[in-house]
Image (tube, rainbow, N blue to C red):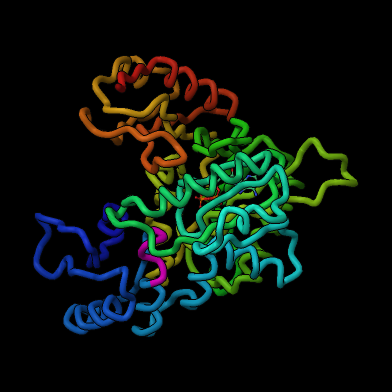
């Protein structure tokens, strides 16, 4: 909303939530679970209040946004392409069919028995619900006992209400061979199929499981230019294989920096989502133009020119890890965390009295710490120092 305001663009929100205090016409009700109804609602509203661009903001809204853009004759990706990109199984199948490197993977349909699900799994492997995000329900299994437990837990997660308050519609699971290595995330933007890098992040904490709660993102990454170029190429190839052509992408990749050069397959894609990075993480990006990541996305949707140069300073964000589950009672050390040298912002996302749910069942971080400094080492140290000052009472 802030980005659109800065761009002098009026926003109309299609939502299934009640939003108060917005002027008439600024919001309308959309059924995301039933795409035909949803599209009819969008078309009816946009006939009265015409729009110049459509932006989907998360996995729940992306496919309807693509449908709407298509029906309104506006810029966007093909609907099937968006649907394939955000489904973890379709994503792997599409890359594999295009001859791109993928880990061995297996589909575990909702109807599969435990024995059917476990048959032929590669170990170690990662089991994930095909339709969720934010690492929700993502678990590593080193043997069949752990895999069986992971399948049971994922199915429970899929049957429980999610971030949107409803149980997931898609009950499928994918199991993939575990890809070792360091993880990176690329924020990019596609224009007519061509990828421009907005930022490449390093994730300095090892993500080896059993769960995959995110922590620190740092940019620029401490990685050679050559390897960075490999990552960009891999994401461009994957976007091409999927058929993604327009708008923001958030890609995650793994690169085995320890493997001998002979064994190294280069960067392997974990995911390529046709949206920006989630949560508040986009705030960690400072572009020389003074535009935010969201403004760049708005400008792209409206066909306006944008610059993609990041400021020379290093920057980072920590998604504050969840120490244990329960009710959030008290937070100490906030002032000290905020006063940490190079720390620019500390936000808390769960209210006092709110539920704190650890991963893999969880989907909400405790909050975010941001830091900016001359180099990534200093940013990382500042994030860790601020985090060490925080104390959460959860019981
Ligand atoms: P989500 O869309 O829920 O974020 P991802 O597919 O991105 O799910 O997986 C979440 C995290 O789990 C990744 O960032 C990565 O650290 C880990 N992960 C997922 N798949 C694999 C894999 N095949 N090998 C190693 N780690 C994986
Ligand atoms: Ca992810």
- Picture layout, residue 369 above or below residue 141: above
Q: Say above or below: 174 vs 148.
A: below
Residue sitting nearer the eye, 10 or 127: 127
Residue 231 visible (yes or no): no
What residue is shown at x 45% (from left), y 74% (from top)? 76
Q: Residue at x 41, y 54 (%)?
A: 158
Q: Is residue 186 visible?
A: yes
Which image quadrant for residue 336?
top left
Query: Which quadrant would residue 47 be assigned to in this image?
Result: bottom left
Q: Residue at x 36, y 35 (%)?
A: 357
Residue 84 percent location from the top left of the image: 54, 70
Q: Position of residue 252 (x, y in %)?
A: 59, 50
Q: Is residue 36 above or below residue 338?
A: below
Q: Position of residue 311 (x, y in %)?
A: 51, 42
| Coordinates of residue 245 in the picture (x, y in percent) | 55, 72
- Viewer-proximal residue among 100 and 240: 100
226 left or right of 309?
right
Numbered circles on residues, count: 0
Q: Main secondary structure of the magenta part?
A: helix
* Highlighted range, magenta: 58-63
Quadrant position of the C terminus in the picture: top left
- Identity of the residue drawn at 11% across and 55% down: 20
Task: Identify the image quadrant of residue 5.
Answer: bottom left
Quadrant for the N terminus in the image: bottom left
Q: Which is nearer the eye, 379 or 39? A: 39
Inspect the magenta stretch and tell me whether residue 249 lies in it: no
């Amino acid at each position: 909303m802030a980005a659109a305001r800065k761009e002098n663009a009026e926003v109309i929100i299609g939502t299934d939530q009640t939003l108060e205090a917005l002027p008439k016409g600024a919001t309308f009700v959309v059924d995301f679970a039933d795409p035909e109804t949803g599209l009819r609602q969008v078309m009816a509203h946009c006939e009265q209040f015409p729009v110049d661009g459509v932006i989907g903001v998360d996995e729940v809204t992306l496919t309807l946004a693509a449908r709407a853009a298509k029906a309104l004759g506006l810029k966007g990706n093909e609907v099937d392409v968006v649907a394939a990109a955000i489904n973890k199984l379709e994503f792997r199948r599409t890359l594999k069919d295009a001859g791109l490197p993928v880990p061995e993977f297996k589909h575990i349909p909702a109807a599969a028995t435990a024995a059917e699900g476990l048959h032929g799994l590669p170990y170690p492997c990662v089991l994930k619900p095909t339709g969720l995000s934010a690492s929700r329900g993502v678990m590593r299994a080193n043997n069949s006992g752990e895999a069986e437990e992971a399948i049971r837990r994922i199915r429970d997660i899929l049957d429980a209400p999610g971030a949107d308050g409803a149980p997931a519609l898609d009950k499928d699971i994918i199991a993939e061979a575990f890809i070792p290595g360091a993880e990176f995330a690329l924020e990019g933007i596609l224009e007519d199929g061509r990828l421009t890098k907005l930022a490449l992040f390093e994730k300095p904490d090892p993500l080896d499981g059993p769960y995959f709660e995110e922590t620190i993102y740092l940019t620029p990454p401490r990685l050679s230019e050559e390897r960075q170029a490999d990552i960009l190429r891999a994401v461009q190839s994957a976007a091409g294989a999927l058929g993604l052509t327009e708008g923001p992408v958030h890609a995650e990749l793994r690169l085995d920096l320890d493997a001998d050069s002979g064994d190294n397959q280069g960067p392997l894609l974990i995911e390529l989502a046709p949206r920006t990075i989630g949560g508040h993480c986009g705030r960690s990006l400072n572009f020389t133009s003074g535009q935010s990541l969201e403004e760049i996305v708005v400008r792209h949707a409206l066909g306006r020119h944008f610059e993609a140069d990041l400021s020379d300073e290093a920057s980072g964000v920590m998604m504050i890890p969840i120490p244990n589950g329960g009710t959030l009672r008290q937070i100490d050390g906030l002032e000290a965390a905020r006063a940490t040298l190079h720390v620019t912002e500390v936000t808390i996302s769960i209210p006092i009295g709110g539920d704190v749910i650890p991963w893999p069942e969880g989907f909400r971080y405790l909050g975010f710490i941001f830091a900016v400094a001359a180099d990534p080492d200093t940013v990382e140290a500042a994030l860790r120092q601020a985090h060490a000052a925080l104390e959460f009472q959860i019981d």
